[in-house]
Image (tube, coloured by chain):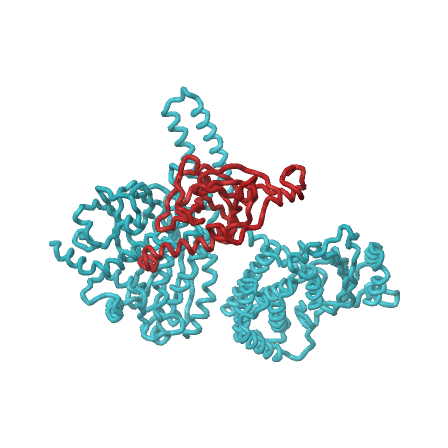
Chain colours: A red, B cyan
Amino acid sequence: MSGERPAFEQADEAVQRYLTVVVSGELFALDISQIREVIHCPRMTRVPLSPRVVPAVINLRGAVVAVIDLAVRLGRAPTRVGRRSCIVVIEVQMDDRLTPIGLLVDAVEEALEASDDMALPRPAFGSDFRQDFQACVLRLGSRFVPVLDLGTVAEAGQLESLVRGHAQSLVGARIGEA
Amino acid sequence: MDLDTRHVLVGEARELLANMETALLEIERDGYDAERINAVFRAAHTIKGSSGLFGLVLIERFCQRMENVLDDVRAGKLRPEPPLFALVLECGDYIARLVDAIEGEREHDDPDPVARERLLAELARWSGAAPAAARSPQGSRAETPAAKPRPQPHHLSMRCTPDLLADGVCPSAYLEHLATMGELTYVCTVTDALPSRQGYMPGQSYFGFEVGVCTALAAEELRTAFELAAEKLTVRIFAAGTPQEELLAHLEGFVAERDELHDAFYAAGLLSPPREPVAPEGLPQKRATEVAPAGSAANAKPAEERRAAEQRMVKVDAGRLDQLINLVGELVIASEGARVSAQNKATPRDAMVEAVARVTQLVEHIRDRALTMRMTPIGDIFQRFPRVVRDVSRELDKQIELEISGADSELDKSMVEKLADPLLHIVRNAIDHGIEPVSERVQCGKPAAGRVALHAHHESGCIVVEVRDDGRGLDPARLRKKAIERGVVSETDVLSREDCYQLIFAPGFSTAEAVTSLSGRGVGMDVVKRNLEALRGEIEIESEVGRGTTFRLRLPLTLAIIEGFHVEVGDTTFVIPLDMVEECVDLRERDGRQHVLNLRGKPLPFVRLRDVFKLDAPPSARESLVVVSAGHHRVGVVVDRLLGNSQAVIKPLGQLFRGLHGVSSSTILGDGSVALILDVPAIVGAAVRAAAQTGAHAGRSVEGASP
């Protein structure tokens, strides 16, 4: 296990495929096996009273799918939707079944393969977002790219309580008791 | 036990319990007969069997005790008396709770040890009352004591699939189950399926069993007992009296175990040296393969198979399916036509429009037909009522005759389930508050038994469910007085007769002088109303003092599609369910200052959707007001623009947005974007409260200002 070179000759289990994405100007990697599809950012419908972290829903071939703004989830300013904006659709456990959910990113860069020895354990400190959002770090040449742990980033229970908390803080108990 | 099996087991048990209940109630009403008690016995027996198969000892042992008592009744050893059937009914309730526990994967916790203790003691008392004649150890199937068969030796060859352990089933559970049906004479573990070292997977079960059992059950009954495990377990049964050649041929299949089995067969009397008779006197010889299913087991098998299948499927009328497929066929042709005319540049615009119209029309037809597939008869919930009525009338010591009609009226499957609780509440209330005590009825010259009628029918795209009683009726004056006492309305309020009736839905309102354990605490009717509104239903009351009351529930047939009214705030479109919209009014600027508006002399509280949702779109120059209603409140919702109505297919927003206020679900618009559907009851409630807090005096000033 000396180097990163002959990735294709190595046994399959030693190679992982990743998709790199840009979130508020920074590069992050996602495990491709968790991704269902990537689509160009369609028209989003803002959900009123919902926090910026799950700001909207989209129509994904007839299904209404919630969108997580990955930038806000990682503690950055909300994403501005532009020409290269994309939605990475993953599936999470929601309503007792696997349900698609969208991750809004600035841009999708590339799909790449990385051998196991390129994936380093996450650093104990030094990242400016929640540590448990980070599964590991990929060494790509001279750069270190954090791999997001989508199970934690898009965990439905946490997001649900974020929405509930935000809605309540905005309207108090005014509508809630109806 | 995997989830599927659990599902099947629970579904089957519930259905059997329902059958048992029906039979018991029929016995109570029409008297005892053998067929009905057989049905009860069958239910207890089958539940026992399938729970035993999975090592669910709590249920199995309980059913066993119940079955013993029932068997004594069938055998004529116990007199069929009403208190016994009341006890069995209660036992059924307890079993239902055990079944709930299985569903919740808590099958090893007793949900109610106290009840279990008591019921078992009572069952023991009854079975003690039977003459102490020898009872076969485990619920025999004998119709009369004389015909009770003697235990016979059988040989079972059992093979499990290797992945058995992965489902959490231990093969020994099967043996234990078998041991409840008779005496195990020998168990020989067969290891011929054990792979060589290479193919061996720890965590897989490679064992088979060759088992001898001495039981009075027929071979077919043994087979039925293992039916539920058929996916995981193959059982070959050699009944008593199987020809020796067949048994010997079976033995030839073994190498290591052959001698051991051979001896065991002899010892059990399956293979006989000439001096022993093959089958005891009085029993015809039967081959395992052609045993005529005996007694109740004859119908049990296909029925159970069918039931298991029903659990996971929806019954669809074949005719409906054909119609749907025909329409899809037409749609394929029509869309092909539309495609061709779209590709042809020379197609006149009229022809294009026509082609599209044809496709649209077919899509609408298909949508309607597809929705009918989810329809189930409302009888599914009506059938629970005989039991409820029986229990309630006993508790209150009233005589009630229940009349059910229109049980085959259909509505959406999801609605049927949600309708059950509100309906139950109304019926209970009718018996408790509506129907007078017997003495009072006789005094008024009414028949002693009160009548409660449940009726359902379709009416212009809705289903109407009526609960009618011939009790004392609602007295508007009394309701009003009570409401004033409770502070629900004030002395000065002018209430119509209908308004008075609607008071019973106010939270904290109860007219019963005495609070009973059933109702009278004033919780209930407001919940009923709220639940019905959540189904977009409404409730109407008709009543005549001294003659009775009718509750009329009107519900849409489905929740999947609504007629929606589209409005816009900024550039966001919202949908309001059209049946909650009363009217639309242009809002003049000076009206928009307070929270209450003067609408034709009446104060109308209103909210701005922009404020409710904290939308930051710039305010619009012109605004419109949509008057919506929920319950007996009317509220105005101010929006920027009215866009008109069209059909909306409801799409749930899912778990993430469950905590959101004011939005209930979403729909997809013609342009492919998503629009949110307003939660009108929530918005109305908020507006009413806001008006009550901040705008109380404003409301009065508006009222005062109007001439």
> Front-most of B706 and B129?
B706
Q: Residue at x 70, y 57 (%)?
A: B203
The C terminus of chain B: image quadrant = bottom left
Q: Residue at x 68, y 64 (%)?
A: B173
Residue B295 x, y percent position in the rendering: 66, 62
Q: Is residue A55 above or below residue B127?
A: above
Q: Residue furthest left?
A: B707
Q: Is residue B475 above or below residue B587?
A: below
Is residue B526 found left or right of B31 in the rendered image? Answer: left
Q: Hey, which quadrant is residue A168 in on the image?
A: bottom left
Inspect this view and state whether residue B410 appears: no
Q: Residue at x 35, y 54 (%)?
A: B661
Q: Residue furthest right?
A: B274
> Front-most of B660 and A83?
A83
The N terminus of chain B: image quadrant = bottom right
Q: Residue furthest top?
A: B346
Is residue B661 found left or right of B253 in the rendered image? Answer: left
Inspect this view and state whether residue B693 appears: yes
> Front-most of B428 and B253?
B253
> Front-most of A163 and B389?
A163
Residue B535 x, y percent position in the rendering: 38, 54
Q: Residue at x 52, y 71 (%)?
A: B90
Q: Is residue B695 above or below residue B462?
A: below
Residue B604 x, y percent position in the rendering: 22, 54
What is the tally of numbered marks visible in this picture? 0
Residue A44 x, y percent position in the rendering: 39, 41
Q: Hey, which quadrant is residue B145 in on the image?
A: bottom right
